[in-house]
Amino acid sequence: MFENLQDKLNKAIKTLKGQGRITEINVAATIKEVRRALTDADVNYKVAKEITDRIRDKALDRKVLISVEPGQLFVKIVQEELTELMGGEAQGINIKGDPAVMLIAGLQGSGKTTFSGKLAAYLKKQGRSVLLVAADIYRPAAIDQLKVLGEQVGVEVYAEPENKNAVEIAQNGIALARKTGKKIVIVDTAGRLAVDEAMMQEIEALKRAIAPTETLFVVDSMTGQDAVNTAKTFNERLNFDGVVLTKLDGDARGGAALSIKTVVNKPIKFISTGEKMEALDVFYPDRMASRILGMGDVISLVERAQQAFDEDESKRINAKMRKNQFDFDDFLSQLQQIKKMGNVKDLLGMIPGMGKMIKDLDIDNDSFKPIEAIISSMTPKERSRPDIIDGSRKKRIANGSGTSITQVNNLLKQFDEMRKMMKKMNTMQSSGKLNKMMR
Ligand code: GDP
C-alpha cells in the first residue's frame, strides 16, 4: 500500500536524519522533497502545498533545528499533519434506527457490491441482524453477485429481479426488515461507468424516498485524482456521510486517501484491501499516517486477526498447545484462519519496518499451497503423530501432494521446531519464568 509514497517520504526525511548539523536550508530542501513525494502520489497540488507549509511552520516553531533528535521530531510532525489531512479522528457509521438504512452509492466497478457484502459481514460479526437489498436494476449479474456474497457471509439478500423500480425494491426491502426484526438494511445501488445525469437523478430520488441513516460513497482508490473529482460530484448531489476507499491492496499511489477529506470535507470511514469478505478495515487516519511513514500498524493487524479468528477454535488450539498436543490438523486450521485475514503481503506490511523489506518480494497466498497439499496427503494418524512418518511414508506424501521429499522434510523439520518452541514456552510458563521474561 502506497509503497512509492512511503519510499519517497522516507528518502526525504532520511537526508535530514543523517545530517550532523541541521540548518534551515536542509529543512527547506526536505520540505520540498516531501511536497514532491505528495504530488507524485497524485495529491492535489494545493493540498500538498498547504500541508508542507504547515509542516515547515511547525518544524520551525518546535525548534527542530536545535532539538536532540531532529529527524525523529520531523517525522512526528509529518505524521501529525498526515493524520490531520486524512481527517483526524476515526469516524464510525450511524447504525441507530429501526431499521438503520445504509445507502451504498458510487460508480460501476468501484466495489459497491463487494463492500455491501463486507459491511454486512462486519456488522453481523458485531452481533447485529442485517438484510442486504439488491437495488441494482441495470445489472442482473449484480443481483446474483450479491446473493453469492450474502450466502458466503450468512446474511439474507432481498431482491426483485423483475422489478425495474429501485425505490420500490428498497422500500419493500426495508418493510421486510421491519417485519422480520432486522436492525440494519444495506441497499446496494446501480452505478454507471462515468458520472451521468440520469444516474444522479436516480440515486437522489432513492435517497429522498428511503431517507437513509447513512449514505456511503464507494470509490476506487486506483483512480487517483479522478476519485477525488467523482467524490466531489456525488457529494454535491447526495451530500453523503462518508467515503469508502476500495482497492487499496492494488498499486494506488495514495492521492485519493490523502486529498478526499480536504476536498469534499467528508470523512473516509472504511478502506477495502482485497476481494475477500474479511478485507475491510475501519479507517483510522493516525494509523494510516504511520503506515505511510513506514511505522507499521500493529493495532490494525491485531484487529484483523480478531475478526478472522474463530474464538472457539482458537481456544481449542490454545489448549492443545498447552498440553503439547499441537498437531498438523491444528496447523492446517491455523493456516486457514490466517488466510482469511487477507493478503499475506499486505498483512506483513503492517509490521513496523517490514513493508520496505518485502516490497520487491513476490509473496502471495498461493505460497501456502504446497504446505496445504502436503498436510492433505497425510493420513489422520500421520497428522496427529508426525513422528511415525518414515522414509516410505515421506515418499508417498510427496507423490500424493505433487511436491518433493525435500519439501516434505522441510515442513516436518519446521513443524518439529515449532513444537519444541511451544514446549519450551509451556515449561517456562509453568515455572513462572515466562512472566518474568515478559515483564
Ligand atoms: P460495483 O460495480 O461497484 O458493485 O463493483 P464490484 O463490487 O462488482 O467490484 C468490481 C470488481 O472489483 C470486482 O471484481 C471485485 O472483486 C473487485 N474489488 C472490489 N473491492 C476490491 C478491493 O478492495 N480490492 C481488490 N483487489 N478488488 C476489489
Image (cartoon, rainbow, N blue to C red):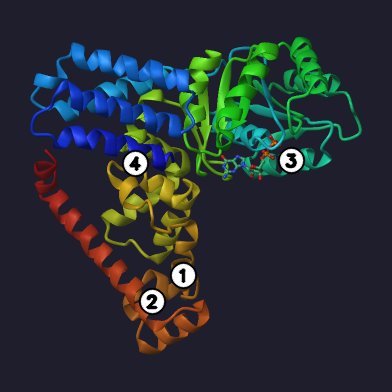
As helix, strand or loop, the secondary structure at mark 4 comes to: helix
Q: Is residue 173 left or right of residue 127?
A: right
Residue at 37% of width from left, 21% of height from top?
A: 83
- Neighbor class of circle 2 (other Cα within 10 Å; few <14, some 14-19, many 20+) is some
Identify which amino acid the numbered label 4 is placed on: Asp
The residue that disc 4 covers is 7
* Pointer 4 or 2: first along the chain: 4
* Pointer 2 or 1: first along the chain: 1
As helix, strand or loop, the secondary structure at mark 3 comes to: helix
Residue at 51% of width from left, 79% of height from top?
A: 402
User: Marks 2 and 1: CB-CB under 8 Å?
Assistant: yes
The residue that disc 3 covers is 147
Mark nearest the camera among 4 and 2 is: 4
**Residue 267 visible to the viewer:** no
* Pointer 4 or 3: first along the chain: 4
Q: Quadrant of the C terminus?
A: top left
List x then y, in percent, for residue 263. 53, 16
Identify which amino acid the numbered label 3 is placed on: Lys
List x then y, in percent, for residue 197. 80, 19
Looking at this view, is 26 or 223 the one in front? 26
